[in-house]
Amino acid sequence: MGIRLMGIAHAKQKLQRTLSARIRMVSATSIDVPKGHFAVYVGEFKKRFVIPISYLNYPLFQDLLNLAEEEFGYDHPTGGLTIPCSEEYFISLTSALNC
């Protein structure tokens, strides 16, 4: 159980580092993100998805955050968190996490 909690904390820290520089840059698109959710950009055309923060608890989503860190570091080209996978994969993953 301690290892799982450390994984969640690690994922949360990555997300905080990624978004900390962007928090000051409030745009019109960030206003429509409900409390308890965050926006990510996915796929070739960087489609925007608003997803629950609870996804940070899942190892599969943490793997996507690791891929994002490896590919983009903490400087994401869209100004938000960019996930380097196809839209189809992301939709299937989030559908599985919802069940």
Image (cartoon, rainbow, N blue to C red):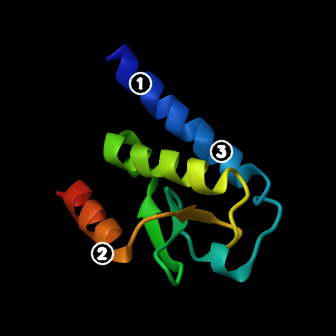
- Residue 37 or residue 55, whichever sits in front: 55
**Relative to 49, does residue 97 appear above or below in the rendering?**
above
Q: Nearer the viewer, mark 2 or mark 1?
A: 2
What kind of residue is marked 3? Gln
Are there few (<14), some (14-19), or many (20+) residues within 10 Å of tag 1? few
CA distance for labels 2 and 1: 29 Å
- Residue 64's tag is none
Give the residue at x 30% y 75%: 88
Q: Are the residues at dot 3 and dot 2 in contact (C-beta closer than 8 Å)?
A: no
- Residue 96 or residue 32, whichever sits in front: 96
Badge 2 element: helix
Query: Which residue does the numbered mark 2 point to in the structure image?
Result: 88
Disc nearer the start of the sequence (3/2): 3
Give the residue at x 52% y 84%: 45
Q: In the rendered view of the protein, which quadrant contains the C terminus?
A: bottom left
Q: Are the residues at dot 2 and dot 1 in contact (C-beta closer than 8 Å)?
A: no
Disc nearer the start of the sequence (2/1): 1
Q: x, y (%) of residue 82?
A: 57, 65
CA distance for labels 3 and 2: 26 Å
Disc nearer the start of the sequence (3/1): 1
Lateral position of residue 33 relative to residue 92, left or right: right
- Residue 16's tag is 3
Q: Residue furthest front?
A: 71
Query: Which residue does the numbered mark 1 point to in the structure image?
Result: 5
